[in-house]
Image (cartoon, helix red, strand yellow):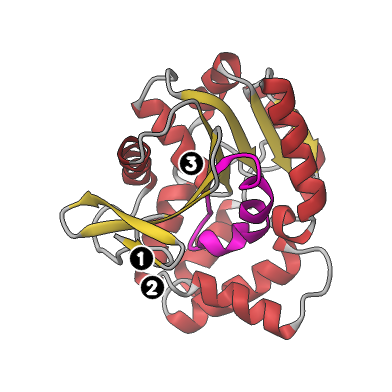
Amino acid sequence: MTVLDGKYVEVDPGVEIFVQDVGSGDPIVFIPGFTFTTEVFIHQVEHFSKTNRVIVIDPRSHGRSSITLQGNDYVTHGTDLAKVIDTLQLKNVTLAGWSFGCLTVWEYLKQNDYDNVKSLIFIDMSPKALSTNHEEDWVEGTIGDIGAIYNTYLRNPAGQREFIQAYTTSVMVQREVTEDELNWLVEQSLKTPYYIATNLFASGMFSDYREEARIASETVPTLTIVADHWAATAIEFTQKISPKSSIEVLGGHLMFWEHSEKFNKLVEQFLSVDT
């Protein structure tokens, strides 16, 4: 069923994933992060659809996909991604995950073989988000900080809104965002209800895909793009966990939106070498 510029793929009875599917050529699949939607990849859809088939999904309980109380974890999201790829009959796929969307990609790889995967792009996410050794490991924050987000902010819509606003202005974007831009970004996140966001947050923080990250970098061409603010730690950790991955540094957590031209060029260069 076609709606606007997208379509829906049923992944479970009564659960549909909204998919943007634009252009033709070798497919690139973009998966957004925690509570975000297809909309954040607007500049990538516009650019890469000129040369590639570009697929962007709203994960389960995100954006225009079904809001469901079941399966709000990255194990299920990996299974959902496989069903989307199979339904669209995609071959030789480049998978590009952003933030917690990387967890979806690693889980997909854990559940499936690499026969259908051409290359991988991981955008600013550690394969192990939480660690007691937060001074050396690439983590999202201290256990205390993560616990405070879970127990204080993600308990109601106002708290979720406050958290996303603060995260956007302090981590995601380097420049000062306009009020309209901030409202738009927060609006994307709030399409996922807070009581589902808590499940996703916990699932992401307790994930450990270090082994999948290692295998991925040894199996197919892999690019890891990290933000400036934790580049030194992220680079050292990535070189240790997945040493064969190419590594680039750019902007903040939402660098592909803020610095879209530079980001798209990095991806173009990676794909041209991979071809």
Q: Give me the residue at 75% from left, 64% from top.
A: 173
* Picture quarter with the N terminus: bottom left
Label 2 and label 3: CA atoms lie apart by: 20 Å
Label 3 and label 1: CA atoms lie apart by: 17 Å
Of the two numbered discs 3 and 1 on the same chain, state the one appearing first in sequence. Answer: 3
Q: Using the image as rendered, state which of residue 23 and residue 86 is in the foreground.
A: 23
Q: Secondary structure at mark 1?
A: helix
When asked about the image quadrant of residue 109, the answer is: top left
Residues shaded magenta: 31-53
Picture coordinates of residue 8 (x, y %)?
32, 57
For residue 228, above or below residue 122? below
Q: Amino acid at mark 1?
A: Ile
Q: Is residue 41 magenta?
A: yes
Q: Give me the residue at 46% from left, 49% from top.
A: 204
Return the residue found at the far left.
Answer: 13
When asked about the image quadrant of residue 51, the answer is: top right
Q: Is residue 186 visible?
A: yes
Q: Secondary structure at mark 3?
A: helix
- Quick check: marks 1 and 2 in contact, CB under 8 Å? yes
Q: Which mark is residue 196?
A: 1
Q: Which mark is residue 193?
A: 2
Q: Using the image as rendered, state which of residue 128 and residue 66 is in the foreground.
A: 66
The residue where tag 3 is placed is 103
* Label 3 neighbour load within 10 Å: few <14, some 14-19, many 20+: many
When asked about the image quadrant of residue 81, the answer is: top left
* Picture quarter with the C terminus: top right
Of the two numbered discs 2 and 3 on the same chain, state the one appearing first in sequence. Answer: 3
Q: Give me the residue at 60% from left, 61% from top.
A: 40
